[in-house]
C-alpha cells in the first residue's frame, strides 16, 4: 500500500485529491496538510511513501518543503501538483528534488498513475515541464553527440524507454530482459550521463533526439 500525504492550502483541492486517492485500492491517505510546515511535521511522525504538494502556499511553500523532505527523508518521494506550470516553478521543483511535476488539470487516472510511478522511483513530468527543462538545459550539439557515443545500443534503447516514462519492470518486459538487467542498465545511464535522478534521464532522452515532442 502506498501511503500518501496531501498538501494544499485550498480545502477544495485537498478534498478532491482525497476522493481520487481513496478510490484507488493501492493508495492510502496518510494525512492532509494546508501548508508545508504542517506537512513537514506530519512527515516526521508518519510513515510516508509520497507527498503530493502544491507549490505556492502560505507559511511554508512547496520549494522549502521539497528541499527539506528530500534532505531529511530521502525515502519519501515528492510529487508537485500545481496550477503554475511556468519555467521558474518547474525548474525550482526539479532542482529541489521533486520526483514528479504535473498540472492540476490532470485527470484522476493521471494523478493516481503519477503517484504510483514516483513511489516506485520513476520520474513523472508533464509535457510542458519537459519542454521547459529541455530549453533550460540547452546542451551544445557536439556535447550531446559525445554523450550519446558513450552509450551502448542497449543503453540507448533503455534511455528511450525511460524517456517514455516506463518503469524498470516495464522496460524489462518491453526488451525481454530481466528486471535486474534493466535496473543495471539504468544505473549505468546514471553514471555515464551524470544524472542525479530519473527526471534528468527523461530530459536527456529528449535532448538526444530519442523522443520527439
Image: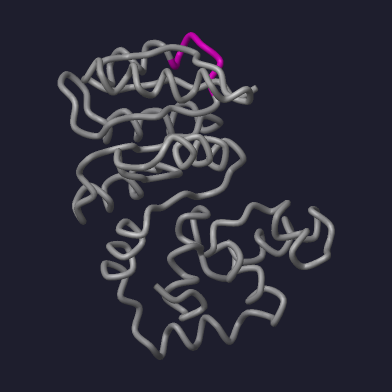
Which residue is depicted at the point 80% across and 54% down?
180
Measuring from the top left, give residue 27's x and y in whole percent: 57, 23
For the point 44% across and 16% down, which residue is it?
43
- In the picture shown, does residue 206 fall above or below 119? below
**Residue 125 appears at what percent x and percent y?**
41, 52
Q: Is residue 106 left or right of residue 49?
A: left
> In what quadrant of the picture does the C terminus appear?
bottom left
Magenta span of residues: 43-48
Looking at the rendering, which quadrant does residue 140 occupy? bottom left
The majority secondary structure of the magenta stretch comes to loop
| Residue 153 percent coordinates (x, y) | 69, 82
In front of the other: 194 or 3? 3
User: Residue at image x 56%, y 42%?
Assistant: 117
Residue 157 lies within the magenta run: no
Against 95, residue 37 (above or below) is: above
Query: Which quarter of the image is occupied by the N terminus?
Result: top right
User: Does the segment drawn in magenta span residue 45?
Assistant: yes
35 versus 81 height, above or below = above
Amino acid at each position: 500500500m502506498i501511503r500518501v500525504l496531501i498538501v494544499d492550502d485550498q480545502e477544495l483541492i485537498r478534498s478532491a485529491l482525497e476522493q481520487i486517492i481513496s478510490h484507488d485500492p493501492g493508495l492510502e491517505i496518510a494525512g492532509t496538510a494546508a501548508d508545508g510546515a504542517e506537512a513537514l511535521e506530519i512527515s516526521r511522525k508518519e510513515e510516508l511513501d509520497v507527498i503530493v504538494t502544491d507549490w505556492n502556499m502560505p507559511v511554508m511553500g512547496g520549494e522549502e518543503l521539497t528541499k527539506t523532505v528530500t534532505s531529511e527523508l530521502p525515502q519519501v518521494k515528492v510529487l508537485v501538483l500545481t496550477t503554475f506550470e511556468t519555467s521558474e516553478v518547474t525548474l525550482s521543483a526539479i532542482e529541489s528534488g521533486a520526483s514528479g511535476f504535473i498540472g492540476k488539470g490532470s485527470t484522476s487516472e493521471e494523478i493516481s498513475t503519477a503517484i504510483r510511478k514516483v513511489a516506485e522511483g520513476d520520474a513523472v513530468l508533464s509535457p510542458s515541464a519537459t519542454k521547459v527543462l529541455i530549453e533550460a538545459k540547452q546542451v551544445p550539439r557536439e556535447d550531446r553527440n559525445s554523450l550519446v557515443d558513450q552509450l551502448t545500443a542497449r543503453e540507448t534503447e533503455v534511455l528511450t524507454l525511460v524517456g517514455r516514462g516506463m518503469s524498470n519492470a516495464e522496460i524489462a518486459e518491453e526488451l525481454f530482459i530481466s528486471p535486474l538487467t534493466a535496473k543495471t542498465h539504468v544505473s549505468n545511464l546514471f553514471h555515464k550521463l551524470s544524472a542525479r535522478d530519473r527526471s534528468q534521464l527523461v530530459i536527456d532522452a529528449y535532448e538526444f533526439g530519442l523522443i520527439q515532442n
